[in-house]
Amino acid sequence: MEFYLAAIVILAGLSISDLIVGVSNDAANFLNSSIGSRVAPRHVIMIIASLGMLAGVTFSQGMMEVARKGIFHPKFFTMPELMVIFLAVMLTDVLLLDLYNTFGLPTSTTVSIVFELLGAAVAVSLIKISRAAEGFASLVNYINTAKALAIISGILLSVVVAFVCGAVVQFLSRLLFTFDFHKRLKRYGGVWGGLALSIIVYFILIKGAKGSTFVTPETISWIKANTGLILLISFFACAFILQVLILFTKVNILKPIVLIGTFALAMAFAANDLVNFIGVPLAGLSAYQVAEAGGNSLTMTMNALQKATPSHTFFLLLAGVIMAVTLWVSRKARTVSATEVNLGRQDEGIERFGSSLLSRTVVRMVDTFSEIIKKMIPKAVLNKLNARFAQQESEFNVDLNVSAKDGKPSFDLVRASVNLMVASALISFATSMKLPLSTTYVTFMVAMGTSFSDRAWGRDSAVYRITGVFTVIGGWFLTALMAFSVSFAFAIAIFYLKAVAVIGIMALGGFIILHNHRLHKAREKEIEDSEIFNLKKVKDGKYAIKTTFEHVGYFLGEVAKTLSQGYDGLATQNRQQLKNIKRETKKIQKWTNIIVANIFKTLRLLQREEVATTQNYAQTIGVLQEIAECQRDVIMRAYDHINNNHKSMLPVQLEELGEIRVCLLSLLGKTSKAMMKKELADFKDIEEDKKRLGRLANEFDQNQIKRIQDDSSKTRLSILFYGFLRDSKMIAEQTSTLLKIFQESFKLDETS
């Protein structure tokens, strides 16, 4: 029994790790709407979400049965066999979720735990079937196929249901309030808010009370018998309070609704998903206690686990505290949340995902279908509908309480409230039915449905947004496959090797988690580098121009650094160095896109302010793109040449390129310094660098022709050499143009 007591201790430790990685992955589900709409300061949102989770853990009692008997029949397994299953599940879950968190991919903790239980249970069942010489068909006796299929089908169905519900409710809400919602809130905001809050009361209080650890059966019976009365009272009470706030205060009632929705969704998350993190360890503890009560029997089957076993409120609250602390301190939690906000944001910008054949096909089909529908609707009705969904920039900013310091939120409070209310209602209903509905699936698909109805997926972004949705959904199926297969393999290893396998897997897991931690820090560093180009704190057009040129200066400094390393890598034929720099070119391209997007934002400000520098400033877009392309071309040419094991460049060619390099880096360095310090540069000195580089390029061009004629420079070397010359000249010319634009803008600003 000592080994199995140690297994309980290991399961307890793994449950803490699982709580940390699980909350890091799922925190985005209930934080994105409130943070994306900037309904309140971040610390206020975090406090409300933490309180919601602490309340929600006490409603998770009914869900704990899923880990004990939801996927397999414990009466066919002994305690040692269940320990094998539970250890395999927890080891797999920690590794899998940490992997997804590292790459910032939202996945479903529910799907992972269900398929891990299924994989490990199938592995142990097959071993038992093989030893008993039973047929493969007897597997259905061990696996709770009916419950497992109900859980899986419920999860898959939630994808469609959540999207449709989100789309329909958002369509009706936007039709009612439009984007200019303040006037309409005064008319019927109280009724709408009362309806929304009464729905939350229904699903959280009435349905969720079934799984509570402190609500007595008599209280539950009374609630059931008076459901209609409770709903009616909550509706009128909430509607009255909200309407009073509208009429006699300046409080935007959507803010308390969003904050209450955040609390409700955090509560629903804890009630529904806590089983994913501690359900298996608690089931292992129950199995150990049953075996110990039976005289430390290792052969008795776990019939006792078929019955409902109350969980200790202390363990549930302790888990809630760990989840709340993780919510505040986890850095990976913020990494995961970017995808949903990016795919659901209202305004245009740089898209995270590309285009695909499937997404293009779907867009064309929807366009065709929408054209057919438009022909069936009278034009007058269609015009009224379009007017209700018309978004005016000034109205959008004012209604969202946007400050110059914070910039524009990803979406407004109407959509944020719908996201939270619909998602919390669906998840709470699933909890009441003891179905482990995926919080990630529901919140993500509701958010996608509301953004679709809000016309956030315009013609210029729909293809990329749909590709993103399909990518995320595809990742969910990959989660199921990985969870099943890895848990299956771990269970077999632990069954035969016992302690040796557990120690080996934990050692391997520690190494993988450490590697993931280092990888995540590198990704965070990349994100921090990109944050340098953040243009959210915009005061006015002139300030934006200065800030953008400062960004450009930093960008040029990085271009100079990578070019210098590229020249070195080519001269020393260092393939690994060039491979590393090749990765950096992607970062340069990304920075270019961010700066260009910032320029577009600035141009909108300049247009409103009628600043004379608009036309010159706009030229920087093409200049930056040309510099980035030339930098990429230099690195790719050098890498391809060395990677294909071609002959090294002639010493004289390397010497000539060295002189080109000195001039180019001098020009880039001086220009970068001037822009970052926002000061007038010695233009003549920089122009002299450019002219000298041009003279050298012409001279070396003639030298290269002679080398071609005497056959000392073969074709590949000649192509590479001329490529370097051309790209270096182009970078110098474009940098000079950039400096002229900066100088003109600087002088105009000084005189104004």
Image: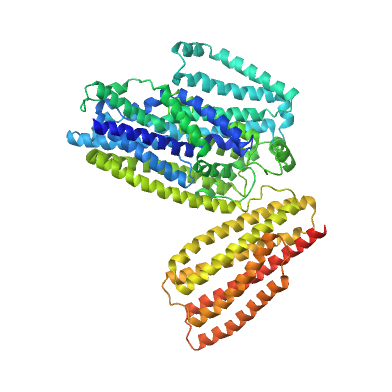
Total numbered labels placed on residues in the image: 0
**Location of residue 562 with respect to 255 vertically, above or below:** below
At 47% from the left edge and 86% from the top edge, which residue is drawn?
712
Horizontal placement of 215 versus 399: left or right? left
Most foreground residue, 79 or 312: 312
Asked if one can make out residue 728 in the rendered structure from this viewpoint, the answer is yes
- Percent across and percent down for residue 425 are 53, 27
> What percent of the width, then of the height, locates residue 274?
44, 30
Quarter of the figure with residue 124: top left
Left or right position of 219 against 43: left
Whether 53 is drawn above or below 541: the answer is above
The N terminus, quarter of image = top left
Residue 150 lies, in percent from the top left, at 39, 29
The quadrant in which the C terminus is found is bottom right
User: Relative to the observer, which residue lies in front, 615 or 457?
Assistant: 615
Residue 724 placed where, x, y %?
Answer: 55, 74
Relative side of 303 to 746, left or right: left
Residue 424 visible in rendering: no
**Residue drawn 48% across the image and 72% down it:** 570
- Corner quadrant of residue 191: top right
Which residue ends up furthest to the bottom in the rendered image? 710
Picture residue at 55% right of the left edge, 77% below the top: 657
Instruction: From this view, report whether residue 181 is shown above or below residue 191.
Output: below
Here the colouring is rainbow
